[in-house]
Image (cartoon, rainbow, N blue to C red):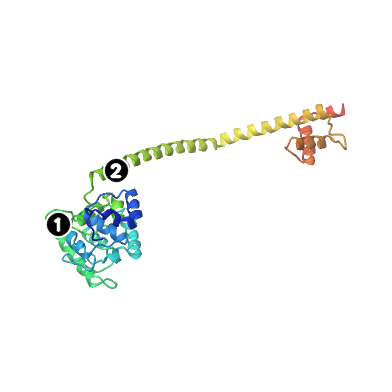
Amino acid sequence: MGISPDDAGAAKELDDHSALLTRTKRSGERFGAPVFWLWWAERNNLPFHADWWLAITPERPIVFDGQHFAHRRKEILSPEYAGQERILIGEWIRKPYWTAREAIDLSLNFKPFRTESWRGHAPETGETIRERDDRFLILERALEIGEISEKAPAKDYLLWLAKRGYYVSLAWRRVVGMPPHDGQHPDTVAENAEIIAENEKLRDMLRAKDERLSALEAKLEASSSPENSRAQKSASTTRIATLQKALIACAVDGHSYTPIQKRSDVPKQIADKAAELGCGVDQQTVRRLLKEASELHVNSNYWSD
């Protein structure tokens, strides 16, 4: 904003951005290298003057400078760029290593091997082609002195790009475990240590839950075995038979029920009492249950006697 942080009225000038500052603090972004805040401001529509970019980083906001940063800020912050980046991360983060060519193409947000040699085709621009050549030449020198290997893990290449002043997005930093920006403050390091410890604790809890779930699944599988199924079925049959015996005994003792009586009002009495108790049952259902119980569990001679 062109205001010195040491000015007495600086805090008042920032009143219009207090919500942004509060949100940024809550997300843990309290300290960072100058280049981090340049990109933070871009994402939050607070662009720095171009001279700040020239003074702090070779990325520069427009076109390219001596290191040919081909992508303009609007390109990098566009939904199309982010969408292509998500696709590339999904395809390439699981690979055990990258080659030099793959690293350069991915750093420019292009799918490797899409183009012949190092020369791009439309819709790539001349700036992009020059940028690819420029990065490859710098990488060749790094290979010659052993600064990086021809085949290396993704994180090694991204660390090398960041070290050389190229832009490495927050998404790529997260998936390979790089810090969100360079030059972290000690307080931020401590906060990250606490987060790591908390994550480890959560992982332990998840492992314990997985173990309990596995034990329950094993128990369920054992209970569903043919032997257990037969035992459960037998227990259920015994329980139903016991209830039928209790029903017919209560009906005979309490209501003098007999199935040979053509028009017995006992089923109605039982149905009425069930309704009174709030557990209603149909009169015909009671009649059928009494008849089944008497046929299954009572000697037919009992009724004739």
Indicate the position of residue 237 as horizontal and vertical percent values.
Answer: 67, 33
Residue in the image at 43% along x and 38% along y: 209
How far apart in space, not on screen, are marks 2 and 1 (Cα)? 34 Å
Nearer to us in this view, 17 or 123: 17
Indicate the position of residue 236 as horizontal and vertical percent values.
Answer: 65, 34
Assign the C terminus to one quadrant of the image. Answer: top right
Please give left or right for residue 64 compared with residue 198 in the image: left
Rendered position, 39 above or below 220? below
Rendered position, 103 above or below 305? below
Instruction: Tell me, for residue 89, which label it has, or none.
Output: none
Q: Which residue is mark 1?
A: 142
For this orientation, the residue located farthest to the left is 145
Nearer to us in this view, 45 or 69: 45
Mark 1: few/some/many CA within 10 Å (<14, 14-19, 20+): some
Could you tell me the amino acid type at mark 2? Glu
Mark 1 falls on what kind of element?
Answer: helix
Q: Nearer the viewer, mark 2 or mark 1?
A: 2
Q: Which residue is mark 2?
A: 191
Q: Quadrant of residue 149?
A: bottom left
Could you tell me the amino acid type at mark 1? Ala
Please give left or right for residue 176 compared with residue 297 in the image: left
